[in-house]
Amino acid sequence: MKVVIQRSKESSVKVEDKIVGKIAYGMVLLICFEKGDNETAVTKAIHKITNVRMFEDPQTKKMSLNLQQVNGEILCISQFTLSWEGEKGHRPSFDNSLPPDDARSLYNKFCEGLISAGFVVASGVFGAYMEVNITNDGPVTFILKF
């Protein structure tokens, strides 16, 4: 499981020219499920992501606050193309991606887990062609693997 996290001032996702998900201040998660991923990885990712201190404390000017401390929101986007490592050739291969039905199930569990943890979560449409508008704040971007 790979997750690209971007701190965001505001972000949205469109499918067929309709906004299907939108957040104010918070984080955008680009999520890729790969072969071997399971619910344990999902649980670990939720814990790490919701506790990562990537928001600036106004007093210290350091990144020392987590999502809950800033009342941030989450935009989750499925992104199977992250499975390509780019080591061989020039044409991306997504052979390491989890099959769509399995990935969809884990993606739904991931989003539901974030909601159960008390966060406002917006999302794209799994498997759809999406237009994602991210206003990256900083820019602050992290790549996590689980």
Image: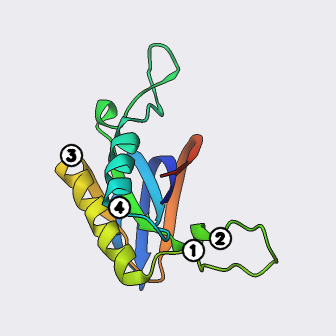
Looking at marks 4 and 3 on the same chain, the residue that comes earlier in the sequence is marked by 4
60 lies left or right of 41: right
Q: Is residue 6 left or right of residue 23?
A: right
> Disc 4 residue type?
Lys
The amino acid on which the numbered mark 1 sits, given as a three-letter code, is Asn
Mark 4–mark 3 Cα distance, whole angstroms, equals 19 Å
The answer to which of 15 and 121 lies nearer the viewer is: 121
Where residue 68 appears, as percent x and y from the top left, is 29, 35
Label whose residue precedes the other's in the sequence (1 or 4) = 4
The residue carrying mark 3 is 117
Left or right position of 67 against 4: left
Dot 3: element: loop
**Residue type at mark 2?**
Trp
The answer to whether the residue labelled 2 contacts the one labelled 4, judged by CB atoms less than 8 Å apart, is no
Whole-number angstrom distance, CA of label 1 to CA of label 3? 29 Å
Residue extending furthest toward the front = 36
Q: Which residue is mark 1?
A: 96
Q: Residue at label 2?
A: 84
Q: Residue at x 21, y 46 (%)?
A: 117
- The secondary structure type at the circle numbered 4 is strand
For the residues bearing labels 1 and 2, Cβ distance under 8 angstroms: yes
Kind of residue indicated by mark 3: Ala
Per the rendering, the mark at residue 114 is none
| Residue at x-position 40% and y-position 44% | 49
Q: Nearer the viewer, mark 1 or mark 4?
A: 1
Q: Which residue is mark 4?
A: 22
Q: Position of residue 92 (x, y in %)?
A: 70, 78
